[in-house]
Amino acid sequence: MYKVFVNEKKLLISKNQENLEKSISFESFTTLEIALDLLENTSTSELNVYGENIDEIWKEFKKLFRIIEAAGGLVSKPNGDILFIKRLGKWDLPKGKMEKGESREESAVREIEEETGLREVELKDFINTTYHIYTERNGDKVLKYTHWFEMYFDGKDTSKPQIEEGITEVAWKNRNQIENEVFPNTFKNIQLIINELYFKN
């Protein structure tokens, strides 16, 4: 199953029909174009494309886009607080595009250090990959894969925002602050990752 966010709307690609607002059975490449059009140009907020061969559907879906891979992390302190950045007025987790020759893990650690100013972040486990779609200024449609890792920090807090990347704030947030401050002002794929790891119990 793949969850893809299209302007904060959810596209679910699955083997079986899911109970969403709208479901379409996969027949051909055109099915995917129709699904995207519905999400981009109508009030439909969630849509399910389903079919027996999910790998084939995903392969066809990727043909619609230029693929960009990124990596980032959910960094926690011993007291359980999570590290967030604020960019373009929204709370986000530190992440960025992978550089040529980098592993996902190397990229995630580098991006966190660059965007937040922290050093010696300890890499723990892979969490998941999220997918979202956006359109670049030149009109190119991009499917962005972001690989997320769980990380730990227990050192001197040297955090400061990377202003040149449009980051205006770096802040540690506790569970209550995440639910009341971050969740109302973040992206759905960020909520997904936090829920998957932090609020799973």
Image: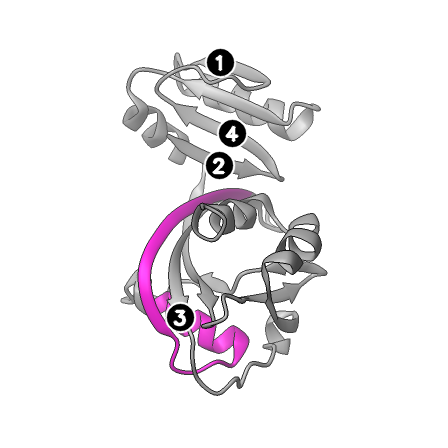
- Looking at the rendered image, the disc whose residue lies closer to the viewer, 3 or 4, is 3
Q: Are marks 3 and 2 in contact (CB under 8 Å)?
A: no
* Residue wearing tag 4: 11
Residue 138: give x, y in percent of width and height: 59, 49
The magenta span reads 107-133
Residue 52 in the image, given as x and y percentages of width and height:
30, 15
Is the residue under label 2 in contact with that under label 1 (CB below 8 Å)?
no
Q: Are marks 4 and 1 in contact (CB under 8 Å)?
A: no
Given the image, on which type of amino acid does mark 3 rest? Tyr
Q: Earlier in the sequence, mark 3 or mark 4?
A: 4
Q: Residue at x 54, y 50 (%)?
A: 190
Question: Which circle marks residue 152 in the picture?
Answer: 3
Disc 4 to disc 2: CB gap under 8 Å: yes
Estimate the spatial distance between the alpha carbons at disc 3 and disc 4, rounded to whole Å: 32 Å
Query: Residue 118: x, y in percent?
Result: 48, 80
Residue 126: in magenta span = yes
Amino acid at the residue labelled 4 = Leu
Mark 1 → mark 2, Cα distance in angstroms: 15 Å
The answer to which of marks 4 and 2 sits earlier in the sequence is 2
Residue under circle 2? 4
The residue carrying mark 1 is 24
